[in-house]
Amino acid sequence: MPISELSRLPVKAPWMGGEGPDSDVVLSSRVRLGRNLAGRTFPHASSDIVRFETLEYIETVIRDELFPEPLGAETLQIDPVSLTDDERRFLDARSLADGDLPSRILIDPDEEIVLHIDGTDHLRLSVTQAGLSLDTALDRARSIDISLENRLQYAVSMDWGYLSSRITDLGTAMRASVLVHVPALAGLGRLCSMARSMASSGYELVPYHSDESFPSNLDADEVVAAELSRDNDVPSLCLLRNTRTLGSDEDVITTKLSDYTGRLVSYERAAREELMREQRTTIAENANRALGILRFARSLTAPEARDLVGQLRLGVLSRLVDEVSLPAVTSLLLIGQDSQAARWTPDADKGDIDTVRARIFRDVLLEV
């Protein structure tokens, strides 16, 4: 893949602006549908010839049915085999890759629609929207799915629903998720216990960054103590998502996920008010200090940047900082990983990546 292809993606995708419904807590909503073709073996069990034929056939149908709308001439067509390790990590961090890389990825310019061809499934399509917009994301995903299904002839069982190479994806073969920022709940030591309470519900709350985790193997009191003792190390950027695809239809899954998210939004707002009553001065000091560092730092590690942006965003939401916009700060939550900085310094060492990350943050903050 030419280097310029991936470089066509902007520093921050439009949906990263944090301007959708309930965007003070919910950054984005995503719906992913997995589909396999009837009469064809799953990709991992197919020969190279069969996989290539299937790939060409699916691409032909997509070109016929989805161009020029909803996809168009500006759609990125990426061959993951040609990507570097940093570029693959970039796609994962940007939520443009999902597990095993497919043979082809199509991405619309707004990064709202992503199609994976010949990966874990013959086809995976995902739609991302800003804020709490699961219904909109599902409607768009369904529209694309309907445009393709007559010609692709999906593998469906009356008993098991959509068939998948993974048993955990049988049924709807749908994964829905919302990306939430909940620093107040984390700061008050309540987030981990909430995550534990969802363990058997068919939904889960997990840290967004792969290098973060909630305390495990602790009883309820120990979990709270661990959260409080770790201060800002408690993950506050999280995914709330379904873990079951069998036994419910798509609308039930997204409706229940929306309900869970709505409760989480209410809890976070109440926790934010509680923190304001008890720690207003501390929140203001931390947020303004974070803004100063982010504006002038010449080097930032990923954990340091993550912590500073979290403190700044809490200050902006609490109306204690008015020098920077909420969309700008929200975008910084999602572009601070090493893989994002490495995109601009593909051969750099870690020190250079930290320098580039600081420059990217300064540039974003200068725009407001």
Image (cartoon, rainbow, N blue to C red):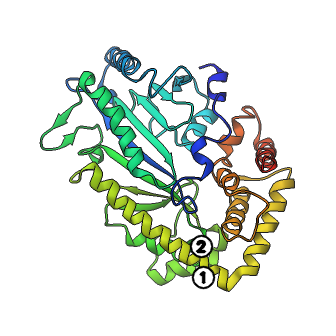
User: In the figure, residue 8 lies in which quadrant?
Assistant: top right
In the image, is residue 73 above or below residue 176?
A: above
> Would residue 111 be found to the left or right of residue 36 on screen?
right
| Callout 2 secondary element | helix
Q: Which residue is mark 2?
A: 184
> Which mark, by number, is residue 168?
none
Going from N to C along the chain, the mark reached first, 1 or 2, is 2
Residue at (51%, 57%) from the top-left corner? 21
Q: Position of residue 157 (x, y in %)?
A: 15, 38
Residue at (48%, 72%) from the top-left corner? 266
For the residue marked with disc 1, what is the amino acid? Answer: Glu
Q: Position of residue 222 (x, y in %)?
A: 50, 81
Q: Nearer the viewer, mark 1 or mark 2?
A: 1
Residue at (67%, 57%) from the top-left corner? 326
* Category of crowding for the residue at label 1, using alpha-carbon neighbours closer than 10 angstroms: few (below 14), some (14–19), many (at least 20): some
Q: Which residue is mark 1?
A: 274
